[in-house]
């Protein structure tokens, strides 16, 4: 769930509500009571003294419903969104046609791009850009990070035509925002494993 303010919610309750809400969109709706039991057990290690109809259970379920309703309002009741990750494969397939002679291109790019995009979504700045534009910025950053750009021999930006109103200035802005996440390594997800990047100034990427 994207954070848009400084209000704090119980993370387990948010996770349970998000899972239940997403199940309404993509799958058969998950049982709410079952999710309450599951996440309570994950947090507390047991479900002792928790049973349907009990005061503790009723309070948890009411909180569950409240958090889910807050989520829906934040999403303006639009429950299905595209995310940048959905554009990674088609965009990389286009680049792959120009990168057939680069050893390990697809593997390196796929891993790095996924990490960049996942980190981008940990910041509220992801709310300011379209998902396809985020994907383009992350891929372009990865191309420079691995030094692949010079081998692609492109006369025009590789992403030309992929996004109607995306400008080079906007791509540069997003790339700078992405790299700013690595100024403080403690702010980056541990799984990012990109300690070489510390800041745009120390690792200039066009």
Image (tube, helix red, strand yellow):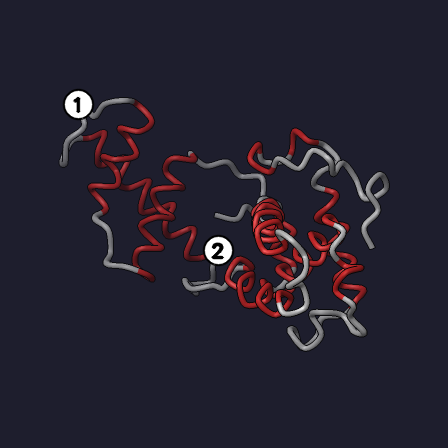
Q: Which mark is residue 74?
A: 2
User: Relative to 157, is 6 on the left or the right?
Assistant: left
Instruction: Say which label, 2 or 1, has the lower sequence index.
Output: 1
At horizontal 48% and vertical 55% (from top left) the residue drawn is 74
User: Relative to 75, is 183 on the left or the right?
Assistant: right
**Is residue 203 or residue 28 the one in the foreground?**
203
Q: Quadrant of residue 194?
A: top right
| Residue occupied by mark 1 | 49
Residue 167, horizontal then vertical, whole percent: 76, 70
Q: Quadrant of residue 50?
A: top left
Q: Element at badge 1?
A: loop
Image quadrant in which the C terminus is located? bottom right
Q: Tell me if mark 1 has few (under 14), some (14-19) or many (20+) residues whose alpha carbon lies within 10 angstroms of its own.
A: few
Would you place residue 25 above or below residue 186 in this image?
Answer: below
**Distance from the alpha carbon under mark 2 to that under mark 1:** 34 Å
User: Relative to 107, is 145 on the left or the right?
Assistant: right
Would you place residue 90 above or below residue 4 in this image?
Answer: below
Would you place residue 53 above or below residue 163 in this image?
Answer: above
């Amino acid at each position: 769930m994207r954070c848009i303010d400084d209000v704090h919610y119980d993370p387990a309750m948010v996770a349970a509500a998000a899972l239940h809400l997403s199940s309404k969109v993509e799958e058969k709706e998950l049982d709410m009571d079952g999710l309450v039991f599951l996440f309570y057990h994950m947090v507390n290690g047991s479900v002792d003294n928790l049973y349907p109809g009990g005061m503790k259970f009723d309070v948890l379920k009411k909180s569950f419903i409240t958090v889910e309703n807050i989520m829906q309002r934040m999403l303006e009741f639009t429950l299905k969104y595209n995310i940048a990750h959905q554009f990674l494969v088609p965009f990389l397939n286009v680049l792959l046609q120009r990168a057939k002679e680069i050893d390990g291109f697809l593997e390196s790019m796929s891993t790095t791009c996924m990490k960049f995009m996942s980190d981008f979504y940990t910041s509220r700045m992801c709310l300011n850009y379209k998902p396809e534009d985020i994907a383009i910025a992350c891929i372009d950053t990865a191309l420079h990070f691995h030094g692949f750009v010079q081998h692609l021999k492109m006369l025009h930006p590789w992403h030309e035509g992929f996004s109607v109103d995306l400008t080079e200035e906007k791509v540069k802005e997003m790339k700078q925002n992405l790299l700013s996440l690595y100024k403080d390594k403690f702010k980056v997800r541990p799984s990012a494993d990109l300690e070489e990047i510390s800041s745009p100034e120390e690792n200039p990427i066009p």
